[in-house]
């Protein structure tokens, strides 16, 4: 079957129908009855109409974490802090926030995490650990959810920002990449066909969103890349990258990775968001 493409003519037709007073739901129904694939049709509507498309979710779809960007303000309030909106992509949903964390909060998180990384390192390697080749060559640790004042404060801020219950989030994972270390492109959702996935899903369902907090600014390299869409995000201390995916499928175009660090270290804290309460 040939691939269905969103042409300028299709976008113009959608705009015309909307100007003529037809609701987005009615335009979607018309597209489906003339043979459009539902996903392509929904994509075309949201690309053409943006947030005004306001479609009800497809059957079986869950609600999603989503910051309130409806007012196009340069900052959004995240409870105890105003966060800058630096970049917004509709499809796939990717938002880059500025100043989600203060410099002091980043430093404090690195200091707390660093002590625990050191332990796992002694087991991991006898060399200086600066050159390894696996898909993920960083060192990591998890904070318990609400583990201490700083973690609680940051988690509450994230929950307010992306409008997702705090207890739907996994504990923050901190990763440290040294020069040469990378995280090869991957999806954050759990692959439905893997044997272990049903068990993992018992603890809160699928992952539906990711927030990567940059805890420092590497001197060179280490950008977060989205190969499917040619997007590169520079890691900058205090900034945070949000993306969401409404199904565990490559069509979400959320393939992403951490490109190799060239100079300096890169530290990130990742918050993965589940469909339900993470236990
Ligand atoms: O380090 C990065 O830029 C990406 C991290 C990431 O993909 C993850 O933690 O799932
Ligand atoms: Fe990831």
Image: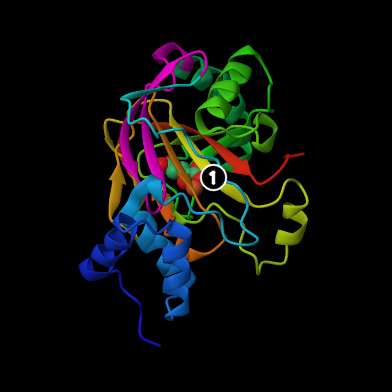
Q: Residues within 10 Å of mark 1 (few under 14, many from 20)?
A: many
Membership of 160 in magenta stretch: no
Residue pictured at 71% horizontal, 43% vertical: 276
Reading the image, the residue beneath label 1 is 209
Question: Considering the image in quadrants, where does the N terminus appear?
Answer: bottom left
Against 162, residue 256 (above or below) is below
Membership of 104 in magenta stretch: yes
Task: Tell me which segment is drawn in magenta.
Answer: 79-105
* Residue 55 percent coordinates (x, y): 49, 54
Residue 51: name its quadrant. top left
The answer to whether mark 1 is within 8 Å of ligand 2 is no
Residue pictured at 41% horizontal, 65% vertical: 27
Against 172, residue 59 (above or below) is below
Q: Residue furthest bottom?
A: 1
* Residue 61 percent coordinates (x, y): 61, 57
Q: Is residue 137 visible?
A: no
Residue pictured at 34% horizontal, 34% vertical: 235
């Amino acid at each position: 079957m040939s691939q269905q493409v969103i042409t300028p003519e299709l976008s113009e037709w959608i705009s015309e129908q909307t100007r003529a007073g037809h609701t987005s739901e009615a335009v979607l129904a018309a597209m489906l009855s003339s043979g459009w694939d539902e996903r392509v049709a929904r994509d075309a509507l949201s690309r053409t109409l943006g947030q005004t498309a306001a479609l009800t979710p497809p059957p079986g779809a869950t609600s999603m974490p989503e910051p309130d960007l409806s007012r196009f303000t340069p900052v959004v309030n995240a409870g105890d802090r105003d966060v800058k909106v630096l970049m917004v992509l509709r499809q796939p949903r990717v938002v880059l926030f500025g100043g989600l964390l203060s410099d002091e909060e980043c430093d404090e998180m690195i200091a707390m995490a660093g002590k625990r990384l050191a332990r796992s390192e002694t087991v991991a390697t006898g060399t200086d650990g600066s050159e390894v080749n696996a898909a993920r060559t960083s060192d990591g640790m998890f904070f318990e959810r609400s583990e201490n004042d700083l973690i609680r404060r940051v988690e509450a801020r994230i929950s307010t920002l992306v409008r997702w219950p705090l207890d739907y989030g996994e504990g923050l994972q901190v990763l440290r990449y040294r020069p040469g270390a990378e995280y090869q492109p991957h999806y954050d959702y759990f692959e439905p066909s893997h044997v272990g996935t049903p068990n993992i899903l018992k603890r809160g369902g699928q992952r539906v969103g990711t927030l990567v907090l940059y805890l420092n600014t590497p001197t060179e390299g280490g950008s977060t890349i989205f190969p499917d869409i040619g997007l590169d995000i520079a890691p900058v201390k205090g900034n945070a990258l949000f993306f969401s995916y409404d199904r565990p499928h490559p069509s979400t175009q959320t393939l992403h990775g951490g490109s190799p660090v060239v100079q300096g270290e890169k530290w990130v804290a990742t918050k993965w968001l589940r469909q339900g309460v993470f236990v």
